[in-house]
Image (cartoon, rainbow, N blue to C red):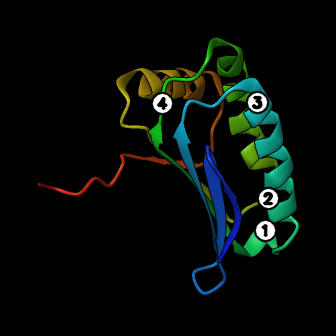
Amino acid sequence: MIVVDKPKYKMSIDEEKCEILIQLNGIIRQHVASEYFEDLDDVADKVVVEHYTLIVDATLQSALASDVVTVLIPALLYYQTFGFKEVVVVMPISKISNAQVKEALKAVDFTGTVVAPNLPKN
């Protein structure tokens, strides 16, 4: 069930799989990032987080604006503060965005799982 459907991100809850799926799309700007965290708080409040996996799918995320790159490290830490059973980050296909996320992951003691995007084969 999709609970947040905005142009730059979607958040859904799959009660059967006990997952919250976040899909990021395009360029995320500072004002969007602030709204994103508010929405994430609201969605997390709808479930028992200890039973759920948080999946942050950044497959279609574009390179981050310079004012948002500084938010990336706190975002990765923030995901871990909720107490989810597991946190999974799906890496972006954009080379620049992928490099930005990798740099942030190096700077954080990220305890989640990082996976490559699952792209359809032609």
Q: Mark 3 or 1 closer to N-term?
A: 1
Element carrying mark 2: loop
**Vertical relation: 70 (above or below) 60:** above
Nearer to us of marks 1 and 4 is: 4
Q: Is 57 left, or right, of 19 in this rendering?
A: left
Using the numbered discs, state the Cα–Cα distance from disc 1 to disc 4 in whole angstroms: 28 Å
The residue labelled by disc 3 is 74
Kindly identify the residue that appears in the image at 53 percent across and 20 percent down. Answer: 103
Residue sticking out furthest to the left: 122
Q: Amino acid at mark 4?
A: Ser
Nearer to us of marks 3 and 2 is: 3
Q: Amino acid at mark 1?
A: Val
Q: Mark 3 or 2 closer to N-term?
A: 3
Mark 1 in CB contact with mark 2 (< 8 angstroms): yes
Q: Mark 2 or 4 closer to N-term?
A: 4
Element carrying mark 4: loop
Element carrying mark 1: helix
Q: Mark 1 or 4 closer to N-term?
A: 1
The residue labelled by disc 1 is 49
Q: Mark 1 or 2 closer to N-term?
A: 1
Kindly identify the residue that appears in the image at 63 percent across and 38 percent down. Answer: 110
Which picture quadrant has residue 45?
A: bottom right
The residue labelled by disc 2 is 83
Mark 2 in CB contact with mark 4 (< 8 angstroms): no
Tell me, for residue 62, which label it has, or none: 4
Using the numbered discs, state the Cα–Cα distance from disc 3 to disc 1 in whole angstroms: 19 Å
Nearer to us of marks 2 and 4 is: 4
Instruction: Assign the N terminus to one quadrant of the image.
Output: bottom right
Instruction: Assign the C terminus to one quadrant of the image.
Output: bottom left
